[in-house]
Amino acid sequence: MTSPGGSVLLVGCGKMGGALLGGWLASGVAADQIKAVEPVAELAAAARAAHGIEVVPDLAALDPAFAPRVVVFAVKPQVMDRVIPPYGRFTGPDTVFLSIAAGKSIAAIAGRLGEPAAIVRAMPNTPASIGRGISVMCANDAVTVSQRDACRALLAAVGAVEVIEDEALLDAVTAVSGSGPAYVFLLIECLAAAAVEAGLPADLANRLALATVAGSGALAAQSPESPETLRRNVTSPHGTTQAALDVLMADDGLKPLLARAVDAAAKRSRELAD
């Protein structure tokens, strides 16, 4: 990836911010085109050491003449109300704000930056740390085509990108792909625990569970066949897999359980909107 056409200001060097930063630099964005704000000394020091960029503890420590093309908010939604307002100084036609804070609506962000602000709201996920993430982004009407392209390029540095026009869909996106890695990690935990209960040593159980989930995901991603077809390919009539699926596909099995989980996450995303 080439430079997005101007400087990038990253606000927050935590897990997701650090993943984005690593992806940008690996994709060809020059280190001198990126500045970061990170108040936690350990995270700031780690970002400087790993990537060689300028990291300051707060906005006041930046050169007053600095004018980023993109400001990326990579902080927890719970602190957004406190963090956002000082960055209103950059509001104008030359700067777009890219927020990856789960649940925080474009309207809420705009209200704290001042009107009119060009804002892109996005939901990436943690596989971004290995370049295998997926992000879904939505822009408000103040965002230009070139600003949309710049934000998309920054997100594409860590994985696939989807663009939607209806911001309301981001609550479901957050519940599925944003929170989804945690569901998969829990599946690995539960499969390993079940293997131990079935008599396998814990270390072997963990290896089998991890390799099975990772391999199955890779197969699903690479295969032209649907997940349903792949499932059927594994399942022999009246065999061992069918016996397990009779439990997982029961009326109170995995499908309604996941539906309730996704619904709970989407509801919480809506609660965080303001």
Image: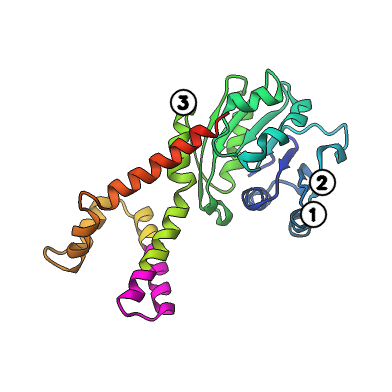
Magenta span contains residue 130: no
In the picture, measured across the screen, residue 176 lies left or right of residue 75, that is left
Span shown in magenta: 192-215
What's the CA distance linking mark 1 and mark 3? 38 Å
User: What kind of residue is marked 1?
Assistant: Ala
Mark with earlier residue (1, 3):
1
Q: Circle 3 sits on which residue?
A: 166
Mark with earlier residue (2, 1):
1
Kindly identify which numbered label has been placed on residue 269.
none
User: What kind of residue is marked 3?
Assistant: Asp
Q: Secondary structure at mark 2?
A: loop
User: In the rendered structure, are the residues bearing label 2 and label 1 in contact, judged by CB atoms less than 8 Å apart?
Assistant: yes
**The quarter of the displayed image where residue 94 is located:** top right
Kindly identify which numbered label has been placed on residue 41.
1
Q: Residue at x 81, y 48 (%)?
A: 54
Q: Circle 2 sits on which residue?
A: 57
Residue 134 image point, x, y percent: 50, 45
Q: Is residue 238 above or below residue 132?
A: below
Magenta span contains residue 204: yes
Q: Is residue 2 above or below residue 201?
A: above
Q: Residues within 10 Å of mark 2 (few under 14, many from 20)?
A: some
Q: Secondary structure at mark 3?
A: loop
User: What kind of residue is marked 2?
Assistant: Pro
